[in-house]
């Protein structure tokens, strides 16, 4: 079980794995996620299900190799197996009754955005996709997004590809030019999602964000992923990960995400030294 069927390096630090998981593939919908462990001593890593194939019995995950566990995950090759995998977790996004949607992905948030883009398009909605990265060589899933989008805008911070600027600048123009937008979905860095929420609130457009709170058990028991939404405490794993963007306390979320920054840096340094030795 949980054997790697296919591995692809999308860019030097972002990897795509297709994994055997028939029971999860059977029940997955856009917006669900899984939690995995690479080996017996590995930490529990939450990742959005980027794609799934019910007939093949497989799911696809896309991740950035930034920490100890994701780097270890990136070392797996075709034929290797994960220690364990649980899912699908979280609530999927309700895609019914939406005729026109705008979806934004910032950085690796594009990988999380893709299943929503595909899902809305297959439901018959008009899909406008906006994705942004720092520079051209970090662009991922362009062909896939283009296949399932009526319009696709790509922005780069340095202007090396597509539109020079940020996704929020493109969104500003889209909100002015497009009529009858039913929903906006934003996934990416917290400051970007907050900026999108502030912008769409002026237009009164329903907006959903997928939150990336620190997560441990994924069942709502530990409370590590708690966020404040509409003045109430919610758990990202159990109540989300998607929430009404206009109700999220983004300042609190950013503070909690930075809480273990020093410890994460210490672990990275220790493991780097271990690899050298």
Image (tube, grey):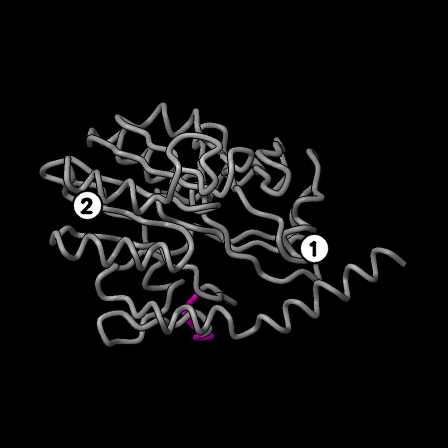
Specify the farthest residue to the right: 277
Relative to 70, say whether 145 is above or below: above
Q: Which quarter of the rendered picture does the C terminus lie within?
A: bottom right
Would you identify the image quadrant in which residue 195 lies?
bottom left
Q: Is residue 48 visible?
A: yes
Question: Does residue 249 appear left or right of residue 37 in this picture?
Answer: left
Magenta residues span 219-223
| Residue under label 1 | 39
| Residue under label 2 | 183
Residue 226 or residue 264, whichever sits in front: 264
Earlier residue among tags 2 and 1: 1
Relative to 86, say whether 141 is above or below: above
Would you identify the image quadrant in which residue 145 lies?
top left
Q: Reply yes or no: does residue 158 show up in magenta.
A: no
Would you identify the image quadrant in which residue 190 lies?
bottom left
Q: Secondary structure at mark 2?
A: strand
Residue 135 or residue 110, whichever sits in front: 135
Q: Position of residue 68 (x, y in %)?
A: 68, 58
Q: Given this view, does label 2 or label 1 mark the residue nearer the observer?
A: 2
Question: Does residue 13 appear left or right of residue 155 in this picture?
Answer: right
């Amino acid at each position: 079980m949980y054997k790697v069927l296919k591995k692809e390096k999308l860019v030097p630090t972002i990897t795509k794995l297709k994994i055997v998981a028939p029971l999860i593939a059977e029940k997955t919908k856009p917006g669900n996620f899984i939690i995995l462990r690479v080996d017996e001593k590995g930490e529990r890593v939450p990742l959005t299900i980027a794609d799934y194939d019910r007939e093949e019995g497989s799911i696809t995950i896309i991740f950035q190799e930034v920490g100890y566990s994701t780097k270890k995950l990136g070392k797996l090759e075709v034929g290797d197996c994960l220690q364990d995998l649980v899912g699908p977790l979280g609530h999927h996004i309700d895609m019914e009754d939406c005729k026109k949607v705008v979806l934004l992905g910032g950085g690796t948030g594009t990988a999380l955005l893709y299943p929503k883009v595909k899902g809305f398009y297959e439901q018959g909605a008009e899909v406008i996709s906006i994705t942004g990265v720092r520079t051209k060589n970090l662009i991922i899933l362009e062909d896939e997004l283009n296949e399932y989008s009526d319009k696709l805008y790509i922005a780069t911070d340095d202007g090396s590809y597509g539109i020079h600027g940020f996704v929020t600048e493109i969104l500003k123009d889209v909100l002015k030019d497009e009529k009858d937008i039913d929903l906006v979905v934003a996934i990416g860095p917290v400051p970007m999602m907050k900026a999108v929420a502030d912008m769409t609130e002026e237009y009164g457009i329903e907006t959903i964000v997928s939150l990336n709170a620190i997560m441990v058990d994924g069942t709502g028991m530990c409370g590590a992923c708690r966020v404040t939404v509409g003045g109430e405490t919610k758990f990202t794993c159990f109540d989300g990960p998607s929430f009404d963007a206009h109700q999220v306390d983004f300042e609190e979320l950013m503070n909690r995400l930075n809480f273990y920054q020093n410890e994460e840096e210490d672990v990275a340094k220790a493991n780097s030294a271990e690899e050298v030795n």
